[in-house]
Amino acid sequence: MTLGHLAASAAPRVRMIDVPVMSQAIRKLGVPLSLVVTADGLVFVSGIPPIDIATGELIDGDIARQCEASMIALKACLSAAGAAVETIVSLKIYASNAGHYGTINEVYRRHFDTHFPARTFVPVGSWPGGFDIEIECIAVKSEEVFGQ
């Protein structure tokens, strides 16, 4: 066996996951990214803004409404890749204002009751889309955790 063969066989199995409606919305915008990528049992979800999973449109409103929409969209992304919130190991929340921290935590607790992944909260200036939150995560595929 050659060293080149070892390097080739050690390459991760990377797959871009299409998320119904949301992936099409991203392609329409011309944004060069994949919403979800899997690699060797891990699931990487890009920053998910408050997007309506049925229409692909951004949801406006207060931070609680936007956070709820981002969480629902994040769950849809995880599901498309064979993962779930219970398999998230790391999560980052980006918000346009540090003052949203308390409200975001209230919404967050409705989606995470006993399983709390490692988490980072990052206040940022703004996004070109006019929304106030994005949530990204790294998870493990459900079959790796639950033996499915």
Image (spheres, rainbow, N blue to C red):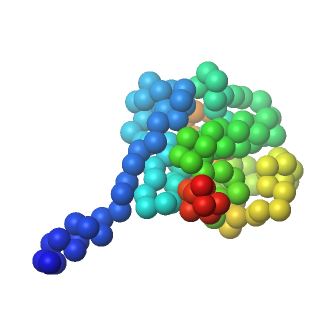
The residue that appears at 52% across and 35% down in the rendered structure is 19
Residue 78, x across and y down, in percent: 60, 46
Q: In the figure, residue 123 lies in which quadrant?
A: bottom right
Residue 114, x across and y down, in percent: 83, 62
Nearest to the observer: residue 27 or residue 72: 72
Would you say 111 lies left or right of 94 here? right
Q: In this view of the protein, can residue 46 be seen by the observer? A: yes
Relative vertical location of residue 55 with respect to residue 75 in this rendering, above or below: above
Would you say 103 lies left or right of 66 here? right
Nearest to the observer: residue 5 or residue 137: 5
Nearest to the observer: residue 71 or residue 84: 84
Marker count (numbered): 0
The residue that appears at 84% across and 57% down in the rendered structure is 113
In the displayed image of the protein, which residue is found farthest to the front? 148
Quarter containing the N terminus: bottom left
Quarter containing the C terminus: bottom right
In the displayed image of the protein, which residue is found farthest to the left? 2
In the displayed image of the protein, which residue is found farthest to the top? 55
Q: In the figure, residue 30 lies in which quadrant?
A: top left
Residue 116, x across and y down, in percent: 76, 63
Would you say 18 lies left or right of 79 here? left
Q: In this view of the protein, can residue 47 be seen by the observer? A: no
The residue that appears at 15% across and 72% down in the rendered structure is 4
